[in-house]
Image (tube, grey):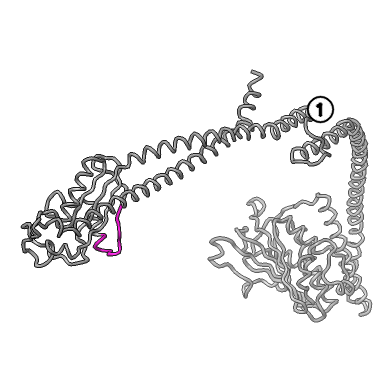
Amino acid sequence: MAQQPSERSFRFGIRFKIAVSIGVIMVALMGVDILWNLSLQNAQAENEAREKAEVLAAEMRAAWDFVDRNQNVINRAEDGSFRTKHLVCVVAAKSISMLFTTETDYSIRFTNDTPRQAANAPDAFEQEALAAFNADPELKAYWRVMAGADGERVFRYLEPLYVTESCLECHGEPVGEPDQYGYPKEGMAVGQVGGAMSITEPMDIYAAGIQNSMVQQVVMVLFMMVAAFAGLYFVTSRLVLRPIDALRAAAKSVGEGDFDYTLAVPDPRARPRDEITELSGEFGRMARDLEALYADLEGQVRSKTDDLMVLNDLLNYQKRELKAALDRLGEEVAYKNEFFAIVSHELRTPLTSILAYARILNGDESLAPKTREAVAEIESNATLLLNMVNNILVISKHAAQKDELVPEPVDFVDLAQFVRKALAPIAAAKDVRLTCSVAPDVPLAMADWEKLRRVLENLVDNAIKYTHRSGFVDLAITFEPTGSEASEGGAGDGDDARDGDSAGDGDSAGDGGDARDGEIVMRVSDDGMGIAAEDLDQIFELYKQAGQSANRRYRGTGLGLAVVRDLTELHGGTVAVESRVKEGSTFTVRIPAVPVPEEEEE
């Protein structure tokens, strides 16, 4: 069983492939040579048959002409009188051809298109030749190798017979007149094709010669091919396959780690060098390099292992340091958020007291105008400071992920009035007209009243901040139903809307009833300085403000719009802005209208 791979390798290896390839090539060459020689032999045999037929035709024509020229001698009596003996040229030629055909395998006969005897009627090949002679007066002969009547291959040869002066006596004019032998004349003219001489030769003798020649040639070619095959196989085995076997054995030794091998090839440094020698030299250099690498491999593996252990220890140390840094950072972030929450919460109490006392003083009619202006300024700045503290508190809770909704029924009329009253002093101090309106179809909805107040206060405060004196800021709250309700047409922002200025602190929402499927839309519009298009994508980011020049002129921390975005998304809503520089801005907040439960409504 262990010897099967070796035997298969020898049987189907390079030697076997070379032998099969050479054998196939030689057989193909021998076949081509046989076919080529067979074609040449057949062509030569046909030429020999044609030459022999030409000789026979020349002899028959000579006998024909001899009889024709000696008619006066043959047909003249001893007394000198002319008496036909019926020995004319055609009779003499036919007699000679008959004798020749009887004593040999050849056949010579005379035929024409209008034979006087049925035996001289032309066959198919002879009719074809006569037609060719009539069509081409220059055609001297017509021949072909074909199968005979008995199936044997024969050579058919025809030469035309032209009408001469001596032929007119029996075959000339007038047509139909009996000649001296009683046959009607055909009316032929001098130079016309009167018939043809047909010669048939057997090709057997040529075939036998071709066969013998081909056998001799095949034997000779086969002997030469075998000798060439043996020589080529010997040279290939000695000069190519034996060195390859040595290289294979050396490669196997090197693969097993044994570098003590020998190659039975000439020294690669010697000249002249061939491809096998160069291959052996390259293999030897490769084996030496592998031996050096293999000898130093264990040392390299130990060195790399030590390096990996050092790197692993360093990685573990850095991992521990990073974890400690992350823990410290987390603690610092927690401390910062807690500090912001505590400070913001503690600042709200005194600020609320300041606002309360400022509003009490502002209601005292006995105050002097300058004192009243000072109290109004105190109230305005305290309101701004309270908004900042509230924004910091909201951002701290959102960063600590402790911000959550406290839903309750929200009357948006009350919400709008509260925002208007809270920011009216700031608007009045800048001589900005602040209006608010709530559409009559805005329903009660479940939401976080305090967070929505923070959203609207930030938007309105922002609008007042960036609006010039004598400008306006408008807060409009509408309801946009979805589905079939939208097609029925609810109340819009038109004449039916309830103006916040006139609604006062009256009943909430009127006939709004429970919230329906739709959205509460809160829009804050102004005719202020506007926002550049390149700043629209970043104004809702933390600590981002539109326009650096505006930041220097207007107070702000960059927290207001970030608080608006976070609290709106907390309600599951969206916030968007439309603005043009020097024309104003419109901020739109959309939140889903969540229906009020029955117990909450009661």
- Residue 34 lies, in percent from the top left, at 46, 41
Q: Which residue is mark 1?
A: 261
Left or right? Give the position of 185 relative to 414: left
The three-letter code of the residue at mark 1 reads Tyr
Query: In the displayed structure, would residue 586 be above or below residue 260?
Result: below
Q: Quadrant of the N terminus?
A: top right
Question: In this view of the protein, which residue sits in the foreground, 551 or 593?
Answer: 551
**Secondary structure under badge 1?**
loop
Looking at the rendering, the stretch of residues picked out in magenta corresponds to: 132-143
Magenta highlight on residue 480: no
Q: Quadrant of residue 251?
A: top right
For the point 61% across and 70% down, which residue is it? 492
Left or right? Give the position of 538 relative to 601: right
**Outermost residue toward the bottom?**
470
- Residue 514 lies, in percent from the top left, at 62, 58
Question: In this view of the protein, which residue sits in the foreground, 55 or 34?
Answer: 55
